[in-house]
Structures are given as C-alpha cells and as structure tokens.
Image (spheres, rainbow, N blue to C red):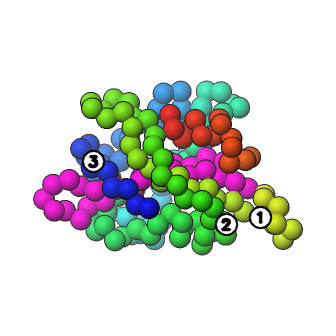
Amino acid sequence: PKVPVSLRASLNTQDQLDNYPKKIGGWESVRDYSDPSLQNYLRADYYILRNYRGNNQSTPPFFLLLLHSQLANSFHDPQVCYKSQGYTIGPLTPDFVAVQGVPGITKIPVNRLEISRVDSKHVVTEGMLVFYTYFHRAKDNSSEITVLRVSTPVDTFKDVAAEQTLKG
C-alpha cells in the first residue's frame, strides 16, 4: 500500500538533496552512487543514492535513496525495481519509523518490504529489509512527489539490529 505523507521541508532541487546530511547520528555516508545516467533512467528530476555506515562495524549498513519529480507517475513501485533485479518479493506490510527534529511529528508511516535472492536449490543467498514512503507536495494541487527508500542487508527477517538500523 502507498501511504502518502505531507512534506513540509523542501527537497525539490538537486542542491537541496545534495545537502541532505552525510552524517546522521552515528552514521556517515561512505559512498555516493548518484549518477546522471541513473537519474535519467529513473525519470527523476533530482535524486541521491548513498551508502551509510555506523560507527560500530557490527551494525549493518543502510542505503538511502531519495527521488524527487514534478510528476507523481514518474516512479515505479520499489517492488517492481527489486523484482527486475532478480529479487523474490516477500511480504509488504505497513509500519512506522521514528522521526527526530520535526516539531509535532514523532513517526511517519512507511511500507516495510522483505526481499531475497534464492539459488537454484531455493536457498536464500541474500536478504534485504526495505522501508519506503512517498511524500506529496501539500499545496497548490501539485503532482510533485518525493520517494524516500532505505534498505539494509539481513541474515533473517527477524534481524533486530537491521530493523533498528532502519527505524532509527
């Protein structure tokens, strides 16, 4: 299910996305995968794709994707994206993640998705926990949309450390 969230902060220029924090709490962006050809392929007006690592090496990394477009129908659902990359799509459930520093908001609704890759013997070789949500511009009847997606590798989908990494 798509859960729209009203976005008050402005993330509608490439400069604003580029200035998205490279340090978030104990996490630091260690690689930026942003690329103009990928931006064109994704049909995004602006976007960032980064890998963040925590201070503690045993904590799983997380990947952040922020996409912004003037047209709400520019993006395909993350399930389509992962399926095209060979992942098996698991359950999709509604969830919430904690938010800090936004007056009056302590959590936002997100979609929680479990994905995996399996070998020819149906053994899971890679698992990923994904949270994503859509932010729609709240004024002017605009069709602008921003997609926020965070993901982290998991050994099992009951991986508490991975879940806490994404939930904050």
Percent position (x, y) of residue 20?
38, 41
CB-based contact (under 8 Å), mark 1 and mark 2: yes
Left/right placement of residue 127 relative to residue 73 reads: right
Q: Is residue 57 above or below residue 148?
A: above
Q: What secondary structure is found at the residue carrying circle 3?
A: strand
The residue under label 1 is: 118
Q: Nearer the viewer, residue 48 or 163?
A: 163
Say which amino acid is labelled 3: Leu
- Residue 18 point in image, percent of width and height: 38, 46
Residue 164 vs 90, above or below: the answer is above
Residue 138 to residue 51: above or below: below
Nearest the viewer among 149 and 105 is 105
Dot placed on the residue nearer the N-terminal end, 2 or 3:
3
- The residue at the point 59 percent across, 65 percent down is 82
**Numbered tag placed on residue 88 in the rendering:** 2
Question: Pointer 3: what residue?
Answer: 7
Q: Start and end of the magenta stretch?
A: 126-153
Residue name at image x 33 percent, y 55 percent: 4
Mark 2: give few (<14), some (14-19) or many (20+) Cα within 10 Å: some
Q: Is residue 145 magenta?
A: yes
The N terminus appears in which quarter of the rendering?
Answer: bottom left
Is residue 68 toward the left or the right of residue 165 in the image?
left
Tell me where residue 122 sits by quadrant: bottom right
Mark 1 / mark 3, whichever is N-terminal: 3
Provide residue 6's location: percent of width, then percent of height. 27, 49
Q: Amino acid at mark 1?
A: Val
Q: What is the quadrant of residue 46 in the picture? A: bottom left
Q: Amino acid at mark 2?
A: Thr
Q: Tell me the element at label 1.
A: strand
Q: Are marks 2 and 3 in contact (CB under 8 Å)?
A: no
